[in-house]
Image (cartoon, helix red, strand yellow):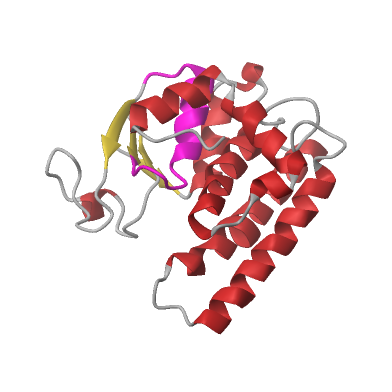
């Protein structure tokens, strides 16, 4: 398999999952501005949507959208326990979390990357993100990970997007529960290996 990625993007999430599962894969870096791969290829030929992550199987088929990719990967090795079995209540809970992270955290940070965003709109979006972070902090007061006692694909996704808080002076340290959560995830060998491979700094 090939994972098309760019540093400091949500593609860190399937990268971590691939390493958690110890699956064979090749990393292919993408330039988000030029849409060219590190070997000179046209990334738009791989994913016409134009953004990472994209997972290409050995048979050439391509899967995009992080929440779909991490579930596909987890199901390749269900014994690892990174996702509950399909058709169960817990799997629906996982999908609930993946949708929340995608729309409310990932999607909430998205507009803040637009340097042309007017100050009033920026303040509105940041306040919205902060409110969602308060909700997460409340949930994680009673459990170490989103689905309970075990790290899973939703945690990999949440870790990847919560890293962006530092770009916008959103202080996770002011929410000790979230700071501890990030530190706990960052201790995992899979996370440290993924950060090293992408050449990006730790969040905490």
Q: Is residue 17 visible?
A: yes
Q: Is residue 88 visible?
A: no
- Was residue 59 drawn as part of the magenta stretch in this picture? no
Residue 63, position as x, y percentages in the image: 41, 44
- Was residue 7 drawn as part of the magenta stretch in this picture? yes
Quadrant where the N terminus sits is top left
Decide if residue 170 is on the left or right side of residue 84: left
Residue 82, position as x, y percentages in the image: 64, 27
Quadrant where the C terminus sits is top right
Instruction: Please give the name of the residue rendered at 24% of the width and 58% of the height, measured from the top-left corner.
Output: 33
Instruction: Please give the name of the residue rendered at 72% of the width and 59% of the height, measured from the top-left corner.
Output: 132
Residue 6, position as x, y percentages in the image: 34, 44
- In the picture as drawn, the residue positioned furthest to the right comes out as 142
Q: Which quadrant of the structure image shows residue 29?
A: top left
Q: How many marks?
A: 0
Decide if residue 152 is on the left or right side of residue 68: right
Work out whether residue 32 or residue 168 is closer to the camera in this orientation and state it: 168
Instruction: Please give the name of the residue rendered at 57% of the width and 42% of the height, measured from the top-left corner.
Output: 157
Residue 141, position as x, y percentages in the image: 85, 39
Residue numbers of the magenta segment: 5-24
Decide if residue 7 is on the left or right side of residue 183: left
Q: Which quadrant of the structure image shows residue 152?
A: top right
Instruction: Please give the name of the residue rendered at 55% of the width and 48% of the height, measured from the top-left corner.
Output: 161
180 relative to 110, above or below: above
202 relative to 51, above or below: above
- In the picture as drawn, the residue positioned furthest to the left comes out as 40
94 relative to 123, above or below: above
């Amino acid at each position: 398999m090939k994972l098309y990625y760019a540093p400091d993007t949500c593609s860190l999430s399937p990268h971590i999952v691939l390493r958690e599962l110890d699956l064979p894969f090749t990393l292919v870096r993408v330039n988000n501005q030029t849409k060219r791969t590190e070997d000179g290829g046209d990334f738009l030929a791989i994913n016409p949507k134009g953004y990472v992550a994209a997972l290409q199987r050995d048979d050439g088929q391509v899967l995009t959208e992080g929440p779909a990719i991490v579930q596909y990967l987890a199901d390749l090795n269900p014994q690892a326990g990174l996702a509950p079995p399909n058709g169960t209540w817990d799997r629906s809970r996982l999908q609930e979390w993946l949708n929340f992270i995608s729309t409310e955290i990932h999607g909430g940070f998205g507009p803040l990357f637009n340097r042309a965003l007017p100050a009033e709109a920026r303040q509105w979006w940041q306040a919205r993100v902060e409110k969602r972070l308060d909700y997460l902090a409340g949930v994680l007061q009673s459990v170490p990970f989103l689905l309970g006692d075990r790290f899973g694909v939703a945690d990999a996704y949440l870790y990847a997007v919560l890293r962006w808080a530092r770009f916008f002076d959103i202080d996770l340290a002011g929410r000790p529960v979230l700071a501890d959560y990030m530190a706990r995830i960052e201790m995992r060998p899979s996370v440290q290996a993924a950060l090293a491979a992408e050449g990006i700094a730790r969040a905490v």
